[in-house]
Image (spheres, rainbow, N blue to C red):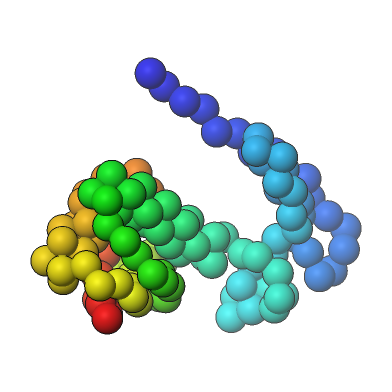
Amino acid sequence: MAHEYRSKIKWSDKEETHGTIEMDCGFTCSFHKPLEFGGTDNIINPEDAFVGSLAMCFSITFKEIAKKMRLDIDDFELDTTGILEEVNGGKMFTKIYLKPDINTNEPENKINRAIQLAEKNCLIARSMKSEIIIEADIE
């Protein structure tokens, strides 16, 4: 079964924004280029949204897998860093680091298995060309 996700862009006359995006889910926000490319700080940009979409998807997928595996997770935080580089005359994210910090009393091998399954089943990760590197801290 296919699913569709739509968005609509409206350009803005305001200097501090490029435009507004309206999404099917009802979320609307202004956006701009990142600061390092002449945009505005403190507003979402496509680069942050790209990296953030992977972080959101991975964390949702991990939570669902942990639930199915009946793992008791006390605390979960995820730091994500995307590396944007010049490749063949254009820019692309070559690597994205996912650094989950997981507090649990569960065996480390079970948590690592849940992390592997989350990476394998995260639809955003499966849709990206970027190398995804997971560096988990399990306590």
Q: Residue at x 88, y 58 (%)?
A: 13
The reply, left or right, for residue 4 in relation to residue 25 is: left
The reply, left or right, for residue 46 in relation to residue 90 is: right
On-image quarter of the N terminus? top left
Which x, y percent locates residue 63? 37, 54
Above or below, 58 against 84 in this view is: above
Name of the residue lying farthest toward the left: 109
On-image quarter of the C terminus? bottom left
Q: Residue at x 64, y 78 (%)?
A: 35
Instruction: Name which quarter of the figure residue 98 lies in.
Output: bottom left
Which x, y percent locates residue 103? 33, 75
Residue 16 is at least partly visible in this image: yes
Q: Residue at x 21, y 67 (%)?
A: 106
Name of the residue lying farthest toward the right: 13
Q: Nearer the viewer, residue 107 or 138?
A: 107
Name of the residue lying farthest toward the top: 1
